[in-house]
Image: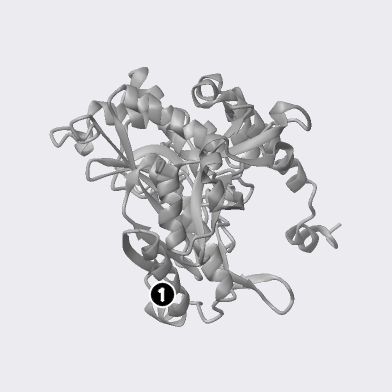
């Protein structure tokens, strides 16, 4: 019996009849199809077939060998789905015409992992998902799922957790069944906003796990008549949702590359160079890590109903300083730019590419920020660090002009992203908002 036949027999005895072959499009949205488990060998060798032009961002044509997208199953990702009895979840990487598809974001991340492996390094990341619970009201408009969630300072609100405990318990039960090592669940700093933390992992496994987290959360929220929303900022006068990356690197002896307790911030020279690379490429990285029009409503110097904002708009590094884009904590780096609307594979791949550029170019260590930048800004200081782009188009154009990062990350993917995001900005710019009507309709 072949190894694949052994796997089929094992899962068939457990009542599994189908494989959910899942990949993500350029937006990071999960796609796929159900295939009988008896075809697992073909799914590994050739892949599940999809019409390439039907998927956002593949760049594939409508005819010929390069028109078909094939998602090849990674056997290490097989997991029965507790919320879909009889179905085995399988993560796929993209191929076309039997070749690695250079617009597949998972392939981009694999390439960056290979760059790290060539140095004898492993990249570890803890991903912190924040999200909102929403539903449509009687007028058909999106509103908070919990209308009683209205505290002026809602962080850590236990009453909201109690009211929504059925959803939270159901979600955590399913995540545990899927192998998540859960660490905590809390109400975040905006009404209707939550965060669930789970253990860090090697970067590719962590990216796969985040997509599985979203799949699970969407399903459980729907079951409870809610929407699990990864929209970065659905509420105007409240903090938005981030997707912070806690990052570290180990060598072949499992020794930490970033940590050095004898240096500033407990960070090594290589960690500081990695940080310098991130800050150097931050404007371009914003197009990938904060990839929506709404992302830049989060990335603003704005007031919050709770009196607190964590928006990381200034390109600097600080010691446990949440007003900075990069936060040093316990000998690792927290990258605070990403939000949950990002394509997790692309965001991590771009982060690694930028950081490695900092190391390989031996970029000078960034200055360490010791200020509360919001307090400094309120005093109208002229000694402020540079800021991130203020809207999506500026970030996209920064990426378009950054030939170095595009070549290291993958120019085919970047070009697809640039074209799609330029169109997204144009579509947004053509809309007439409620604010415009209220402000201008009878003014002149």
Question: Which quadrant of the figure has residue 324?
Answer: top left
- Out of 202 and 66, give the one closest to the viewer: 66
Q: Is residue 347 above or below residue 37?
A: above
Identify the residue shown where x is 50% and y is 31%: 108
How was this image coloured? Answer: one colour
- Out of 57 and 2, give the one closest to the viewer: 2
The extreme left residue here reads 262
Q: Is residue 15 above or below residue 58?
A: below
- Residue 13 visible: yes
- x, y percentage for residue 193? 48, 66
Total tally of numbered discs in the picture: 1
Asked if residue 413 lies left or right of residue 313, the reply is right
Tag 1, which secondary structure?
helix
- Quadrant of the frame with the C terminus: bottom right
- Residue 303 visible: no
- x, y percentage for residue 46? 57, 35
- x, y percentage for residue 174? 42, 67
Identify the residue shown where x is 64% and y is 47%: 293
Asked if residue 72 lies left or right of residue 436, the reply is left
- Quadrant of the frame with the N terminus: top left
User: Residue beneath label 1, please?
Assistant: 169
- x, y percentage for residue 203? 38, 40
The extreme front residue here reads 1
Q: Is residue 57 above or below residue 156?
A: above
Label 1 crowd (10 A; few <14 / some 14-19 / many >=20): few
- Out of 437 and 51, give the one closest to the viewer: 51
- Out of 67 and 340, give the one closest to the viewer: 67
Asked if residue 91 lies left or right of residue 267, the reply is right
Question: Which quadrant of the figure has residue 253?
Answer: top left
Question: Which quadrant of the figure has residue 236?
Answer: bottom right
Identify the residue shown where x is 68% and y is 77%: 137
């Amino acid at each position: 019996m072949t190894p694949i036949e052994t796997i089929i027999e094992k899962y068939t005895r457990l009542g599994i009849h189908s494989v959910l072959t899942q990949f993500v499009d350029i937006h990071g949205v999960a796609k796929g199809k159900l295939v009988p488990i008896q075809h697992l060998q073909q799914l590994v060798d050739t892949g599940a077939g999809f019409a390439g032009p039907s998927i956002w961002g593949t760049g594939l044509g409508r005819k010929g060998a390069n028109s078909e997208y094939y998602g090849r199953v990674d056997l290490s990702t097989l997991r029965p789905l507790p919320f879909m009895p009889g179905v085995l979840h399988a993560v796929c990487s993209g191929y076309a015409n039997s070749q690695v598809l250079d617009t597949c974001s998972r392939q981009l991340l694999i390439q960056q992992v290979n760059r790290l492996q060539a140095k004898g390094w492993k990249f570890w990341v803890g991903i912190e998902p924040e999200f909102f619970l929403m539903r449509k009201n009687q007028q058909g408009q999106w509103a908070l799922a919990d209308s009683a969630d209205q505290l002026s300072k809602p962080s850590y609100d236990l009453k909201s957790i109690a009211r929504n405990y059925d959803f939270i318990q159901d979600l955590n039960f399913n995540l545990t069944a899927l192998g998540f090592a859960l660490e905590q669940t809390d109400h975040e700093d905006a009404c209707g906003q939550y965060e669930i933390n789970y253990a860090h992992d090697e970067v590719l496994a962590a990216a796969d796990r985040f997509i599985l987290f979203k799949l699970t959360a969407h399903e459980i929220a729907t079951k409870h008549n809610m929407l699990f929303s990864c929209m970065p900022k659905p509420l105007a006068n409240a903090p938005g949702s981030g997707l912070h990356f806690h990052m570290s690197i180990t060598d072949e002896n499992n020794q930490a590359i970033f940590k050095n307790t004898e240096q500033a911030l407990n960070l090594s020279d290589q960690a500081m160079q990695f940080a310098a690379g991130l800050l150097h490429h931050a404007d371009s990285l914003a197009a990938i890590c904060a990839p929506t029009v709404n992302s830049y409503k989060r990335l603003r110097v704005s007031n919050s109903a709770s009196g607190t904002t964590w928006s990381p708009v200034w390109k600097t590094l600080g010691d446990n300083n949440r007003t900075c884009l990069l936060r040093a904590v316990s000998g690792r780096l927290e990258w605070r730019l990403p939000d949950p609307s990002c394509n997790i594979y692309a965001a991590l791949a771009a982060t690694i590419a930028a950081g490695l550029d900092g190391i390989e170019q031996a970029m000078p260590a960034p200055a360490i920020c010791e200020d509360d930048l919001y307090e400094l800004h309120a005093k109208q200081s002229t000694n402020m660090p540079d800021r991130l782009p203020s809207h999506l188009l500026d970030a996209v154009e920064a990426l378009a002009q950054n030939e170095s990062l595009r070549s290291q990350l993958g120019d085919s993917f970047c070009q697809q992203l640039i074209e799609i995001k330029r169109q997204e900005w144009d579509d947004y710019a053509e809309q007439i908002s409620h604010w415009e009507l209220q402000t201008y309709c009878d003014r002149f």
